[in-house]
Amino acid sequence: MSSQPRSTPASASSSQPEAEQTRGWRTVVHNDPVNLMTYVEWVFMTYFSMTPDTARSLMLRVHERGRAVVSHGQREQMEADAQAMHAFGLWATIEEEE
């Protein structure tokens, strides 16, 4: 499991349709009544290698706005990121970027 941020695009497989290759996806973490804010911040620093300031800012966005985008990239990687968030006990989904 990689701990690098997911903000850089990766090359798409030539077996995918062209529209699928050019689509961007994002992983979104949603607020929940279970996890402590400090734990969410720790997960962001641990899994995504975020700085403490970035992790705190995104954690506060989750807490105050109900959701925050934590990674961008190809669909398969965003699915892996969402599954990792689930393994940490966080609620996460993926969305296609506009």
Image (cartoon, rainbow, N blue to C red):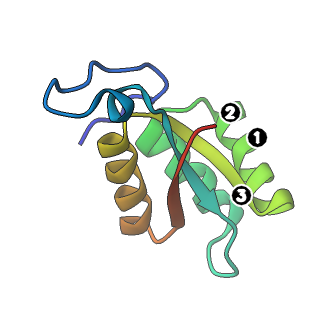
Front-lying residue, 12 or 58: 12
Question: How many other residues sit within 10 Å of disc 3, few (<14), some (14-19) or many (≥20)?
Answer: some
The image quadrant where one finds the C terminus is: top right
Helix, strand or loop for disc 1: helix
Helix, strand or loop for disc 3: strand
* Mark in front: 3 vs 2: 3
Left or right of residue 65, residue 33 in this image: left
Residue with the mark numbered 2: 54
Residue furthest right as drawn: 64
Front-lying residue, 55 or 30: 30
Residue with the mark numbered 3: 67
Left or right of residue 20, residue 73 in this image: right
In the rendered image, the vertical position of residue 50 relative to residue 67, given as above or below: above
Residue furthest left as drawn: 15
Front-lying residue, 31 or 36: 31
Question: How many other residues sit within 10 Å of disc 1, few (<14), some (14-19) or many (≥20)?
Answer: some
Task: Quadrant for residue 83, please give it.
Answer: bottom left
**Residue 70 image position (x, y, % from top left):** 58, 42
Residue at the (51%, 61%) spot, across then down: 93
Helix, strand or loop for disc 2: helix
Query: Which labelled disc corresponds to residue 45?
Result: none
Residue type highlighted by circle 2: Thr
Residue with the mark numbered 1: 57
Residue at the (46%, 72%) spot, across then down: 89
Measure the C-alpha gap from mark 3 to mark 2. 15 Å
In the rendered image, the vertical position of residue 70 relative to residue 49, given as above or below: below
Q: Decide: marks 1, 2 in contact (CB < 8 A)?
A: yes
